[in-house]
Structures are given as C-alpha cells and as structure tokens.
Image (tube, helix red, strand yellow):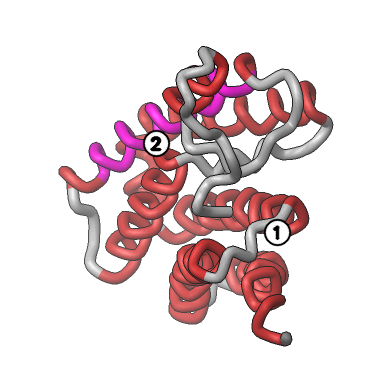
Amino acid sequence: MIWRGLPNAISLARLLASPVLIALMLRGRETPFKWLLVAAMLSDILDGFLARYYGLQSKRGAFLDSTADVLLSVTAVLGVVRFRPEFVSVHYKPLLFVLGLYFGEVLGALWRYGRLSSFHSYLARAAGQTQGVFVACLFFVGYIEWLFYAMIAISAVAYAEEILLLFLLPTWKPDVRGVYWVLSSKKGKGESNEPLPGR
C-alpha cells in the first residue's frame, strides 16, 4: 500500500528541504526560512511516529532519516548563525562543545561503519526534539535561557552515549534503545535489543 512508503517519503522531503533552506538563508529570507525549518523539524517527529506505529522500520528508512537529520542539523546551525549572530556570539562555547560531540559521533560512525550510525536512541530522539523546540522558540519567541541549557545538557549526554555505542557495537546496527539495553543484551539478561520503536 502507498501509505507504507509514507515515512520514507517524509524523510526524503526533509532531505530535499535542506537546499531550499540554504537558498533562503543566502538570500536573507528569514520568514520563509524559519517556517520551512520548523516544518522540516516537525516532519522528523512525524516520520518516526508513523514508522513506529505501523511497524515500518527498515535499514533503508533509518539511513534516509539519519542523512536527512544531518543535513537539516547543519542547515539549522547555519541559519542560526546567519539570522541570530548575537545569540551565537554570546553562547558559542557551549554550542561548539555540543557540535563537537555531534560531529565527532558522525565522523566516528563513518570511520567505524562506513555510514551514519542511525542509532536513534531514546536520548538522541529526546535531544533532537529539545533542539527543535529551542530553535523554534529562538526564531519565533526569542532566547529562553533555561530551555537553552536544558537542550545543551540533553544533547551532550545523548551524543556522548552515541559515541560510547560506537565502541560497544562492532557492526552497524540501526535503531537501538541505548547503552543500557546494549549492555543488557550482551550480558544475556534476556533484554532484547531488537530494532527500537523508532527510526
């Protein structure tokens, strides 16, 4: 059925949104940029929900979703730098710290597996959702201090966990719940590490 391909279609649309967002950013079109960015971030939640709810997780879907996530993340960072330079100039240290962890995990996965990790752990999804809320608030409402530091803390822990997962999983395995479940599975405690309810 057509709807079975909907999660991947949404991921593909998010992937294709990145060059449009970059073009809007380069032209200084903040209003359409922020609306399209928020729509793209919301679509990340939607495609994951549909994949989990209908049991449509797949390696192809995980790869497509992760690729779209990386491109959208880079685009969002560039957009914040372009349209909110005053925010970046004040908070660049924690931002660089989290970005270092993020891109460290990306490069580590490419080195270890030859592809993006696509772990989609619980913490990583929480980080992505918190980042989306913060970026949307930054563009539409303004800077919210407690939300910023909550986003930094959750993101740092999530990316540190993903880096640890690179060491724990010798072969590529998408959609894992997190370190606890991987360790439990390795110890044979009966915990399942089957593909997570998520992509």
Residue drawn at point x = 35 percent, y = 64 percent = 136
Task: Looking at the picture, tell me which residue is in the foreground, 109 or 79.
Answer: 109
Q: Identify the element where label 2 is drawn.
A: helix
Residue that carries the numbered disc 2 in the rendered image: 155
- Give the amino acid at mark 1: Gly
Q: Residues within 10 Å of mark 2 (few under 14, many from 20)?
A: many
Residue drawn at point x = 77 percent, y = 30 percent = 110
The percent position of residue 70, horizontal first and vertical second, equals 63, 49
User: Sequence-wise, which precedes: disc 2 or disc 1?
Assistant: 1
The percent position of residue 72, horizontal first and vertical second, equals 59, 57
Residue that carries the numbered disc 1 in the rendered image: 61
Q: In terms of image quadrants, where is residue 195?
A: top right
Q: Are marks 2 and 1 in contact (CB under 8 Å)?
A: no
Residue 198 can be seen in this image: yes
Q: In terms of image quadrants, where is residue 5?
A: bottom right
- Give the amino acid at mark 2: Ser
Give the prevailing secondary structure in the magenta stretch: helix
Residue drawn at point x = 31 percent, y = 37 percent = 90
Read off the magenta span: 148-166
